[in-house]
Amino acid sequence: MSDDCIFCSIVAGDIPARTVHETDDVLAFLDANPLARGHTLVIPKSHARHLGDLDDDLASDLFAAVTELTPHIQSTVGADGANVGINDGAAAGQEVPHVHVHVIPRFDGDGGAPLHAVGGERPDLTDDELDAVAKAIGE
Ligand code: AMP
Ligand code: ZN
């Protein structure tokens, strides 16, 4: 629990939320400023700022909830698809410093964009540079 974290306050019941799913370790609630009907945030109940801060069990529980909820949300709101994503770090647009997975229902012709639209200017990488990046990440 972090004192000045809005999502910890939701977990503690100090701030209201429209909860849609809860387990011992994971909570899901509607985004207060939804990008689409059914836009849901899925969070670990314990405070962690970054995805890499989660231990394996919690990461697994979090993803299990996302996996279960995504098709359920989609069918509930009659969506045709969904974008599922995490803004990890301020540079990626993370505003609330508590890990949260966005499940954003998508509708044919809704005017939205794919996750590819979140990137900045695309780097022009040579095959050698791609090989080097793959090697470095794989080490
Ligand atoms: P991010 O930019 O990934 O950190 O997104 C934070 C999300 O949290 C935004 O989509 C906000 O609309 C949402 N949000 C902020 N405060 C609340 C709240 N009290 N209840 C529900 N959603 C919230
Ligand atoms: Zn928190």
Image (cartoon, rainbow, N blue to C red):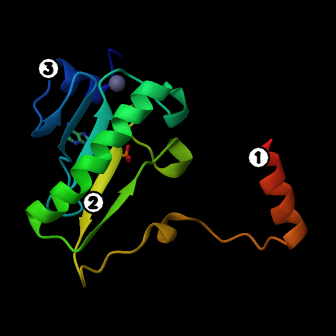
Q: Is residue 100 visible?
A: no
Real-space Cα separation, disc 1 to disc 2, in angstroms: 31 Å
Tell me which label, 3 or 2, sits earlier in the chain.
Answer: 3
Within 8 Å: ligand 1 and the Cβ of disc 3?
no
Dot 1 beta carbon under 8 Å from ligand 1:
no
Q: Mark 3–mark 2 contact, CB under 8 Å? A: no
Q: Earlier in the sequence, mark 1 or mark 2?
A: 2
Q: Amino acid at mark 1?
A: Gly
> Which label belongs to residue 14?
3
Residue 64 numbered mark, or none = none
Please state which amino acid type lies under the numbered disc 3: Asp
Q: Are marks 3 and 1 in contact (CB under 8 Å)?
A: no
The residue to which callout 2 is attached is 104
Q: Marks 3 and 2, how far apart in space?
A: 25 Å
Measured as percent of width and height from the top left, residue 12 is found at 19, 18
Q: Residues within 10 Å of mark 2 (few under 14, many from 20)?
A: many
Quickly name the residue at label 1.
138
Locate the N terminus and report the quarter of the image it occupies.
Answer: top left
Q: Is residue 123 left or right of residue 118?
A: right
Relative to 7, is 81 above or below? below
**Position in image of residue 34 (x %, y %):** 20, 56
Q: Looking at the picture, which amino acid does disc 2 mark? A: Ile
**Depicted 9 relative to depicted 38: above or below:** above
Q: Disc 3 vs disc 1: which is toward the camera?
A: 1
Ligand 2 sits in quadrant: top left
- Image point (22%, 74%), residue name: 80
Q: Is residue 100 left or right of residue 93?
A: left
Q: Residues within 10 Å of mark 1 (few under 14, many from 20)?
A: few
In the figure, residue 109 lies in which quadrant?
A: bottom left
